[in-house]
Amino acid sequence: MIISLCDDPDAVADLAAQRVADLLHEQPRTVLGLPTGRTPVLLYDRLADAHAADGLDFAQVTTFNLDEFVGIGDLHPGSYRAYMRRYLFDRVNLPAGRGVVLDGLAPDPEAECHRFEALIDAAGGMDLQILGLGANGHIGFNEPGDSLQAATHVMTLLAPSREANAFFFDDDVSQVPAQAMTMGMGTILKARRLLLLVTGARKARTIAAAVRGPVTTLLPASFLQLHTEVEIICDSEAAAGLR
């Protein structure tokens, strides 16, 4: 596990974007796993700028998003499909259909999860999975609990996760769906490389426990200790407990 320390969220985004750009230059047919939330927004800005200014090429890239809310469609402004269009997909030359996001309106969410897993397998698995960290230690929407599911599955969201996503629903937590579909920890850990972005003081205790504490389902991020190629990029506030 490599821990890269940065001064602030802008520097975290700069370094993460460099990691992605280096991979795309070396391997144009890269398969990327992508997160949503507040932390990756700066990263997506950097990648869009690199595409516009330097021709960073997404023409052969395939992406898979970590999760999507159950019960809202891709036209809903709070959906992760809408998020990805707004912050990345519509700003780079990623071909239509190559940015794969779970269908929140699928009539059978469990079947949608199986379909999604099959698409990842057909693409050859993910070369790089980019991750964010929930303040309660969740990765994707794998919430703390007595057990974790390995494959993509439907998850009932805990209150902190719904509160963290209220930003995308007019700051009204009651509008945040109660369930989401998410890659399981097994699916995440099958990626060849993992890149975890962590910013802000409120994540400091969580990331310190995930790196230095026991591997436990009560802190899903701790399972990253089991992977052989992980880089954690932290800003100074998030890294306070790691120094």
Image (spheres, helix red, strand yellow):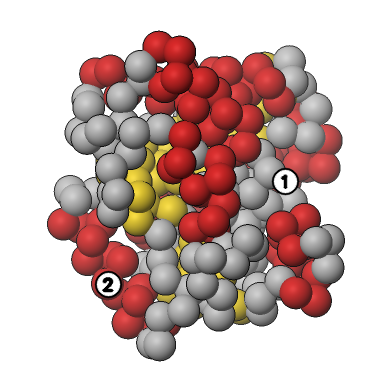
Q: Residue furthest top?
A: 54
Mark 2–mark 1 contact, CB under 8 Å?
no
Q: Report helix, strand or loop for mark 1.
A: helix
Identify residue type, mark 1. Thr
Total count of labels: 2
Q: Which residue is mark 1?
A: 206
- Please state which of the two labelled residues, at mark 2 or mark 1, is closer to the viewer: 2
Identify residue type, mark 2. Arg
Query: In the image, residue 215 lies at what x, y percent?
Result: 55, 53
> Is 6 situated left or right of 36 in this image?
right
Query: In the image, residue 60 lies at what x, y percent?
Result: 22, 35
The residue closer to the viewer here, 5 or 208, is 5
Query: In the image, residue 14 lies at what x, y percent?
Result: 57, 18
Q: Which mark is residue 115?
A: 2
The image quadrant of residue 196 is top right
Q: Quadrant of the C terminus?
A: top right
